[in-house]
Image (tube, helix red, strand yellow):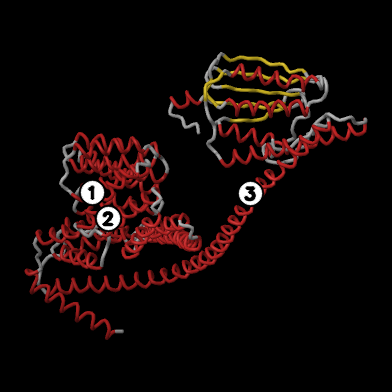
Amino acid sequence: MPKFFGIIITLSFFNLLIYGQNGHQRAISEDTLKSIIDQLRSYSQVTSKKQYELAFRGDSLAKISKDTFHIIEFKIEIGYLYYVDTKFNEAIKEYDKGLAIEKLSPNHKQLFELKRLKSIVYDRLGQFKSATDTLISALEVVISKNDTAKIISGYNSLGIFYKRAGYLENAEKYYLKNFDISSKWHDNLSYLIAANNLALFYKHLKETTKAYNLLDSVYRTTPIKNNYYKYGTIHNLGAILSADGQYQKAHAYLKEALNWARENNIQYKIAQNLFEIAIVNYQLRNYELALDQFNEVLALYTQLNDPERIMDTHYELSRVQEALKKPFEALANYKKYSILNDSLLSVKKTEEIAMNEAIFQNKIQGEQLAALQIKEELNEEKLFSRNLYIMGLSVVLASFIFISFIVYRKNKLIGYQKNEIEKINNALINSNEKITSQHDLLILRNKEVEAQNAEMENLMAIVAHDLKSPLNKIKGLSDILNYTTLNNDQNDILSKIQNITEEGRRLIEELSFLNNLEANKNSANPKGFDPVELIIEKISEYQPEALAKSIEINYAIESNISEFYSDRSYIGRIIDNLLSNAIKFSSLNSKIEVLLTGHTNLQLKISDHAQGFSEEDKKHLFQKFKRLSARPTHGESSTGLGLSIVKLLVDQLNGSIKVEDTPGGGATFIVNFPDFKKAEALNIKTI
């Protein structure tokens, strides 16, 4: 051990001697440092080994030159490289080093930028409060200095944080503030960036027309020389148009942005634009072309090592392959999407755990220690006497021993953390495998159920069609027997045959009607008609049936609508089914009330004083063939389809239906119908 320290002392003395003799050669020009910074900022948002080497080289040169301004600038650049590579713990450390140096040489612009970038890392880690607190404290500084450029940057970041956290009202407030200040400030680039951010926020709210009009207006009236932002705006215009369903126009914008990206060989932008174009082609049903484009995008994002975008591309590939009837390829891509999605969540959680550990360990000593070390380094004077050599050597040895101790402790802690993380990851992998297996099984079972449902619907249609003809023949033959002389027993048998035949024909008619409704979701044919005339007509039709059971039908009209736009036949069928059911399930000598109200839209109430519905009945009220607790009171037949047909018809008319208990016993059906013409005038989708 003494021999080891002897070597260290000798080497340290040798280094100090060289430093003393050649110190005058260590000065690095400010232009050299600025050139390195400019070169680093010219790269696109994809890191490389070359960028790291350049950043670390610049950092070393700035330290040699004792240039605090450029030391901070390189801390910003190194931190940003770590951030882009999702090395959030390392990024925070670099920004904290920069903040420690800034305390020794205050510069409000650098202070703001360090805190802003640090807040972005917190945001990526899901630490919303830390992100906003850090950024707001930075904004207070630049607001007091009236630094418009930094205020704009801060408001924009705050808008992004609130949007990601789901606080959309606050997000809009800061986006609008940013846009308002930028529009009054004489900087075209800031104005265009603010317009892009606000437009993308409106796109997020699905207000695509508003988003397009805003961005298009600013783009056409604002001269911009920076092609990166110009074609980024063109890309955003295309993406907004695509979200609005204007696929042909969107394709033209996206193609222009893609051509620029290819000419300048910006791989990330090529992938980004090609991804949106593939989505457009998918929406236009150009599935083969979309498939080729998504495959090219996948290759690009794989080369760029962007796991989030790789995950999104696998998902889109599964949709395209499903449209091309390639279920196995679609399932394979969806599995890759699911695995990547789970993996990214796991990585993010691991980074968050590591970040919290680092904050806890360095909370008290981290920033102070960095400030002390840098202060000693920056305040070191170029003295060449033996006393200063010895002092410098002591500092080096003390630092070495202290750092060795810190490294030992940190390595021990890292080893423990690695073991814990490995246990968590193994548990996550096992869980993911189980989830993936269950997910595959669920997909297969869903497909089996869908196939069985389709087969059952098809079988029902075939049975209904094949039964209709023989039943019609039975009815015809039984009608002929009415004209022959039969005894009482024969007449009784003939009557039963006719009743059973009629019930069968009604069941087939309702089955066919129900299948047609389910197959044609938008089959309503709205026209103007008098709703009062319709309700009176239907009550008149059912009076004989009600009188046969001594049931009294009372009705009231509280509506002044003389012309209502909807499907008269559908509303008539709804009234038929509800009135028929009310009579069928009511006992002798009871009452049925019908009430029609409304001055813009219509509301129909049909109340009976019959058996009503149990709570269990209400859960299955509108299901096909569902047997309920209530039974017809006079031997009438029931197909079990009436209320399911009513619900489908109400949905076709964009209305609503509910059932309430009638006071004193029974049930009240309440149906609301919108007026199609008035809804159309208000831009409300009715079909």
Q: Is residue 578 left or right of residue 271?
A: right
Q: Which residue is mark 2?
A: 269
Residue farthest along the left direction in this orientation: 24
Q: Which residue is mark 1?
A: 231
Give the class, few, some or many, for how many residues have Cα within 10 Å of label 3's Cα (few <14, many ≥20).
few
Q: Quadrant of residue 179?
A: top left
- Nearest the viewer among 331 and 159 is 331
| Discs 2, 1 touching: Cβ within 8 Å | yes
Q: What's the amino acid at mark 2?
A: Lys
Indicate the position of residue 141 as horizontal and vertical percent values. Answer: 25, 42
Upstream in the sequence, badge 1 or badge 3?
A: 1
Indicate the position of residue 44 as horizontal and vertical percent values. Answer: 24, 57
Residue at image point 90% right, 31% down = 486
**CA–CA distance between discs 3 and 2?**
49 Å
Helix or strand or loop: what does disc 3 sit on? helix
Upstream in the sequence, badge 3 or badge 2?
A: 2
Indicate the position of residue 273 as horizontal and vertical percent values. Answer: 30, 53
Q: Which residue is mark 3?
A: 458
Can residue 79 be seen in the rendering of this structure? no
Residue at image point 63% right, 23% down = 604
Helix or strand or loop: what does disc 1 sit on? helix
| Discs 3, 2 touching: Cβ within 8 Å | no
Q: What's the amino acid at mark 1?
A: Tyr
Q: Is residue 514 left or right of residue 387?
A: right
Residue at image point 39% right, 39% down = 205
Give the class, few, some or many, for how many residues have Cα within 10 Å of label 2's Cα (few <14, many ≥20).
many
Indicate the position of residue 180 as horizontal and vertical percent values. Answer: 25, 34
Of circles 3 and 2, which is in front?
3
**CA–CA distance between discs 2 and 1?**
10 Å
Is 616 situated above or below 258? above
Helix or strand or loop: what does disc 2 sit on? helix
